[in-house]
Image (cartoon, grey):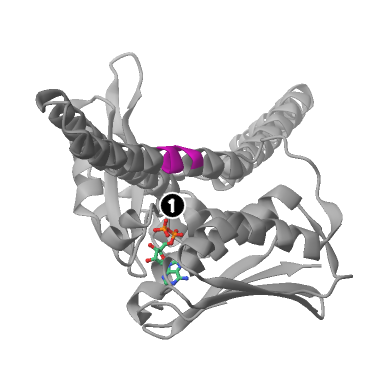
Amino acid sequence: MVNALPFLIGALLLILGLYLLFRRFSLSFEAKYKAGLDQLSRLLKEQTEEAVSEGRRLALILNSMTEGVVALDNSLHITLVNSRFCSLFGVDYSAENSFRGASFLEFTGSAELEAAARQVLSEGQPAQTIIRRYVSGTEQHYQVFAAPLKTGASGESQGAVVVLGDISRLMKLELIRKDFAANVSHELRTPIQIVKGFTENILDSSLDDKEQTRRFMEIIRKNINTMENLTTDLLTLVSLEDESAARPAMEETLLAPLIAEAVGMAEIAARKKDISIECSCPPDLSAKLYGPLFIQALINLLDNGIKYSDPLSQVRISAARKENELIIEVSDNGIGIPAEAMGRLFERFYRVDRSRSRSEGGTGLGLAIVRHIAMLHRGTAEVESHAGEGSVFRLKLPC
Ligand code: ADP
């Protein structure tokens, strides 16, 4: 025991010495590196904040896009999606996080889209296509761009990104344009063929038969008139649809003289069928109008009233103000319009009876022009009719 005492004291002194040494060392280490550690943690904090705000900025950009964007991993599971993509598929974006890892096919329900993404992954090349979907019973078209996501120099695939743009409106306009071109060609083809045929008849026949030549020439003239009417109506329609077209401003105008002018123009056709035109308009009734266009709309309605009525009948035109609206009515007791045709009457080239319209020199564009003119006045064009009883066409213009 006595022998162990110096040893114990020595051991205690050693521990104390080591402790003091360590403490000194750690204090100097702390002092030396504290500044560095503080700087490092500040840097880390800044970078984390930057990354968070960068992420937010990216999400903001992605969610402001009008296109739907989705990123997929190599097994076609969603890794990122923007709000537009969700709305295109009727999904609430607020639950965005729960879509991570969802199957692309299950999310979209579109085998076509999945096939496009799969192709991009297998070929490693961008691809584009157009897909169709039915949303609430209406057909929608989407332009799809898909591209592989590659990283590093080796270009290792990290999945694919798919961008979806709604082009339904464009497709609809394209369809209207195609229909329009097809309709115009069709409308012109018939009179051109007739003119060609009768010209050949005249050239092949003996010109001595003056009576026959005259009959053929009458037919040619009628068909040239049809083509002239068609081109005039087409030009009118095109200029009405041209929003940038310069036209004189609307002017406060008395209606009675405008109606009288339209009636004067329609009377030539009315007289040929012994149809009388009856007018009713307060002499002091005035409104802000595009005068020449307003007259054109009235002429078209009066012409129709005459064309689709029996001889010796009557066509009426009236104008009145009702509260804040100017109401102009053109009515007849003619053939009327069957109920199933009412909804399509103001469409370009729509006719209830094509051959009757043609034989009357109609182009199928008169009512489309009327509707455009009403719209330019911020008004509407309506019709009430019963087959066999007659029709009432009504313009309602704000005043
Ligand atoms: P169209 O040159 O053939 O008369 P519109 O665009 O003016 O072309 O009219 C479209 C169709 O609407 C006509 O072909 C006709 O079938 C029908 N329609 C228009 N106005 C009348 C009317 N007053 N009575 C009966 N049918 C009419």
Report the residue at 68% width, 65% height from top: 379
Above or below: residue 210 compared with residue 236: above
Span colored in magenta: 228-232
Would you place residue 78 above or below residue 148 in this image? below
Res. 72 in view: no
Pointer 1 local density, CA inside 10 Å: few below 14, some 14–19, many at least 20: many
In the displayed structure, 222 sits above or below 203; it is below
Magenta part, dominant SS: helix
Residue 280 x, y percent position in the rendering: 73, 76
Q: Would you say 336 lies left or right of 276 here?
A: left
Q: Position of residue 94 (x, y in %)?
A: 53, 63
Q: Type of residue at label 1?
A: Phe
Nearest to the observer: residue 295 or residue 9: 295
Task: State the image quarter where residue 102 is shown.
Answer: bottom left
State yes or no: residue 265 in magenta: no
Which one is nearer the viewer's eye here, 187 or 107?
A: 187
In the picture of the structure, the residue carrying the numbered disc 1 is: 85
Which residue is painted at 15% across and 23% down in the image? 203
Residue 342's image quarter? bottom left
- The quadrant of the rendered image in which ligand 1 is seen is bottom left
Please state which of residues 205 and 374 is positioned toward the viewer in this rendering. 205
